[in-house]
């Protein structure tokens, strides 16, 4: 391992490898360090991505990491009512273990150097500023230096906290996720994703079925208000009541935290920035982070290239990353965070009302922070009208 790079990226998830790929393409000397022995494994994801997001990352949907094409979805309200989501723009269920590796292959081919089993445990400081990272690799401790360190170390990001950013999560800003990949289950239409709502089945969250084939799917849950019970408890209880699911076999089991808001005003300090889940860059309504990572990788790359070119990688120069991210993504995600706070206040009968008042496009609009139709509907209902303040 060489001792000096332009940038060091901690974590080879999508946020890290996408940023590494884009920066290497622009000619930077890039090091990506991943603590696990295999990039992409274990997966902690339902593996869904929209077609426009996959295209932005640079893929077509024909790659071998795609398991299933999706044309829309069904939202199921607590009373069993359904809302059909639009077929367009469509999307895919991926095999994250292969997808993450594809981005890593591309980053390496673009010139980034990647090491697995390389665990960063601390930062190097010089004159009070970050100057590199301390890691263990092959049982040896190493110091490696760079101009900018990038924390892409996921939801539990320790490195951003060592750098002094308030990136820790509180119960309000994190959901617990639990998921089984199951085979031999029956799915009404295996080209649709299914989302089940209800305070009894998934408090402050939802249960999902994301099909990976005719009888194969990720069956999972994300919850934010477990009342002392685990996400697994709620998922198992729900599956037990669904013979078409409970008859299946569990092929893989995984769990993980999902940031749902608590966006950081500043994701930078001198010679340092945070990206992806490490910076809470996730859509708080559905918990999707792949699209957000790809937007942020583009924004970060632009700023990293400019600051390294100018020789000024101070916090005030890197602050452009904060400004651009808040303008292009954060402003809208903050609106979506408000919808999540509203959802904490609604009852199952309010959710049932959504079934008769909202169409699939309205739900899609909500995932993009567009609340005008929801507000109109809420204002017509005396109880819901009192909750409109949460959206302001
Ligand atoms: C149950 C669940 C379901 C989800 N479903 C979806 C979905 O369907 N669609 C979607 O878009 N998003 C989904 N997400 C969110 C998505 O998985 C994340 O947003 C995405 O993986 C974030 O990418 P990242 O690169 O920021 O972090 P990660 O993918 O978590 O990558 C971080 C990497 O950093 C490494 N690392 C950590 N610390 C260190 C260290 N000290 N040194 C070296 N390496 C380190 C880790 O090993 C890891 O590989 C889901 C999340 C969960 C938990």
Image (cartoon, rainbow, N blue to C red):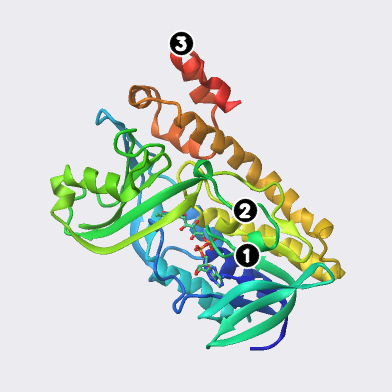
Which is more N-terminal, label 3 or label 2?
A: 2
Q: Which residue is mark 2?
A: 167
Residue 277 placement (x, y as % from top left): 55, 56
Residue located at (38% from left, 56% from top): 46
Q: Earlier in the sequence, mark 1 or mark 2?
A: 1
Which residue appears at 65% of the width and 78% of the height?
A: 134
Q: Nearer the viewer, residue 136 or 318?
A: 136
387 is higher (above) or lower (below) than 328: above
Q: Return the x and y of residue 7 as percentages of the image width and height.
A: 70, 74
SS category of the residue bearing label 3: helix
Residue 50 showing in the rendered view: no
Secondary structure at numbered mark 1: helix
Say whether disc 1 or disc 3 marks the residue closer to the N-terminus: 1
Q: Nearer the viewer, residue 168 or 219?
A: 168
Name the residue: 36% across, 42% down. 228
Q: Would the CB of label 2 be found within 8 Å of ligand 1? A: no
- Check residue 382 in the rendering and tell me which mark sits there, or answer none: 3
- Residue that badge 1 annotates: 159
Separation of marks 2 and 3 at Cα, in angstroms: 38 Å
User: Would residue 175 be visible to someone looking at this image?
Assistant: yes
Q: Does label 1 point to a residue whose CB lies under 8 Å from ligand 1?
A: yes
Mark 1 or 3: in front is 1
Q: Are marks 2 and 3 in contact (CB under 8 Å)?
A: no
């Amino acid at each position: 391992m060489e001792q000096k790079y332009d940038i060091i990226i901690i974590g080879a998830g999508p946020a890290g490898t996408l940023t590494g790929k884009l920066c290497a393409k622009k000619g930077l000397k890039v090091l990506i360090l991943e603590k696990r022995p295999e990039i992409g494994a274990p997966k902690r994801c339902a593996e869904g991505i929209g077609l426009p997001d996959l295209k932005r990352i640079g893929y077509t949907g024909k790659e071998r990491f795609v398991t299933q094409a999706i044309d829309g979805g069904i939202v199921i309200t607590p009373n069993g009512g359904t809302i059909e989501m639009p077929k367009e723009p469509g999307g895919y269920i991926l095999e994250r273990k292969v997808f993450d590796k594809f981005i890593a292959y591309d980053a390496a081919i673009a010139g980034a150097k990647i090491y697995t089993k390389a665990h960063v445990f601390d930062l190097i400081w010089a004159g009070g500023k970050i100057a590199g990272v301390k890691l263990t690799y092959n049982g040896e401790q190493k110091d490696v230096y760079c101009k900018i360190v990038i924390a892409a170390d996921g939801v539990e990001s320790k490195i951003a906290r060592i750098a002094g950013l308030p990136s820790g999560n509180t119960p309000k800003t994190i959901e617990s996720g639990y998921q089984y990949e199951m085979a031999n289950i029956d799915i009404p239409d295996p080209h649709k994703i299914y989302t089940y709502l209800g305070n009894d089945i998934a408090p402050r969250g939802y249960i999902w079925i994301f099909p990976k084939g005719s009888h194969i799917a990720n069956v999972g849950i994300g919850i934010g208000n477990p009342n002392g019970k685990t996400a697994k408890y709620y998922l198992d209880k729900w599956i037990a009541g669904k013979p078409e699911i409970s008859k299946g076999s569990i092929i893989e089991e995984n769990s993980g935290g999902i940031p749902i808001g608590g966006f950081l005003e500043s994701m930078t300090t001198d010679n340092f920035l945070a990206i992806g889940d490490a910076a809470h860059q996730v859509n708080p309504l559905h918990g999707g982070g792949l699209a957000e990572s790809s937007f942020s990788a583009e924004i970060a790359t632009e700023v990293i290239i400019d600051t390294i070119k100018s020789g000024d990688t101070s916090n005030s120069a890197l602050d452009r990353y904060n400004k651009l991210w808040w303008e292009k993504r954060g402003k809208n995600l903050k609106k979506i965070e408000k919808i999540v706070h509203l959802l904490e206040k609604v009852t199952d009968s309010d959710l049932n009302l959504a079934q008769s008042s909202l169409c699939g496009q309205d739900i899609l609009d909500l995932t993009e922070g567009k609340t005008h139709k929801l507000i109109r509907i809420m204002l017509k209902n005396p109880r819901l009208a009192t909750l409109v303040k949460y959206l302001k």
